[in-house]
Image (cartoon, rainbow, N blue to C red):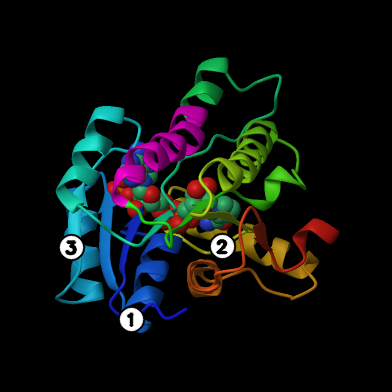
Amino acid sequence: MTLQGKRVVVLGGTSGIGLATAKAFLNESAQVVIASRSESKLSEAKQVLGGNVEGYEIDFRSEEKVKEFFSKVGAFDHLVVTAGEGAMGHFSELPVASAKEAFDSKFWGQYITVLAALPYLKDESSITLTSGVYGVRPPQGATTLAAINSAIDGLVRGLAIDLAPIRVNVVSPGIVDTPIYAGMPDEQRQGMFSGIAQQLPVGRIAQPEDIAESYVYLAKNGFTTGTAVLIDGGAHLV
Ligand SMILES: NC(=O)c1ccc[n+]([C@@H]2O[C@H](COP(=O)([O-])OP(=O)(O)OC[C@H]3O[C@@H](n4cnc5c(N)ncnc54)[C@H](OP(=O)(O)O)[C@@H]3O)[C@@H](O)[C@H]2O)c1
């Protein structure tokens, strides 16, 4: 299935995996709409991506704002959601409020987005959400993310049945070098990346472009629905 001329919304398309995914869809000659909360990230991303990209400021935790966003965007073909913030911390130490906040963002944000997008999609459309390898292979301190990612994987299986013939899938990445880790001191971040890389069968951590290809595949392949693409360099095996 060609993506040429298709309209693709990438919610979270201003950074990391979403930005690389917006680029990957543009390389397929799709028309791309990106959205996230920060005006400055939006304008930087639009510069990186080039002239024809539409951008909208939106916080996907607000049902009202997300509805308003899709009414402005109008009809489109494929939805990708990469927006979301998690929470790390040992189960006995992470405050319940932080776990709930993470669910509000990564789980409920994606749920709200799918619901609000429905009136603007077609039978041939696809929806691709984002979970993560911690859903199947959590390290210590990832209980909340394990729960959120598993909930998203489950949501996608249910949606693939409820929303058929619209196809619904999820990309589940391992560790990816993105601005999500920008808050860590450089040395600590590099140490974490190289420690993980040494353990992985592929010997390196992912770049956002590695993951972006999975979203393009899921939008293009008309026989794929209700499935998770686990793209983690073999992290689930070690
Ligand atoms: N990087 C990894 O190692 C990794 C591993 C497994 C899973 N993942 C998952 O992959 C997804 C993307 O991660 P990433 O590494 O690409 O992160 P990132 O570089 O921080 O990008 C996240 C994007 O989501 C947007 N966003 C966050 N909260 C939002 C909200 N409430 N409303 C609208 N937009 C929002 C951000 O823009 P604004 O700040 O402007 O809103 C940004 O564009 C996340 O769900 C993450 O959990 C990442």
Give the alpha-carbon distance from disc 3 to disc 1, as whole Å.
17 Å
Mark 2, ligand 1, within 8 Å: the answer is yes
* Mark 2 or 3: the one toward you: 3
User: Residue at 34% across / 62% down in the picture?
Assistant: 77
Q: Is 83 placed left or right of 96 in the picture?
A: left
Q: Which badge, 3 or 1, comes first in the chain's sequence? A: 1
112 inside magenta stretch: yes
User: Residue at 51% across / 29% down in the picture?
Assistant: 103
Mark 1, ligand 1, within 8 Å: the answer is no
Q: Is 7 placed left or right of 159 in the picture?
A: left
Give the alpha-carbon distance from disc 2 to disc 3, as whole Å.
26 Å
SS of the residue under disc 2: loop
Give the alpha-carbon distance from disc 1 to disc 2, as whole Å.
28 Å
- Identify the main secondary structure in magenta: helix
Magenta-colored span: 102-120
In this rendering, the answer to whether 237 lies above or below 205 is above
In this rendering, the answer to whether 110 lies above or below 222 is above
Q: Do the residues labelled 2 and 3 touch (CB within 8 Å)?
A: no
Badge 3 local density, few (<14 within 10 Å), some, or many (20+)? some
Residue that label 2 marks: 176
Kind of residue at badge 2? Val
Residue that label 3 marks: 54
Residue that label 1 marks: 4
Q: Quadrant of residue 150?
A: top right
Badge 1 local density, few (<14 within 10 Å), some, or many (20+)? few
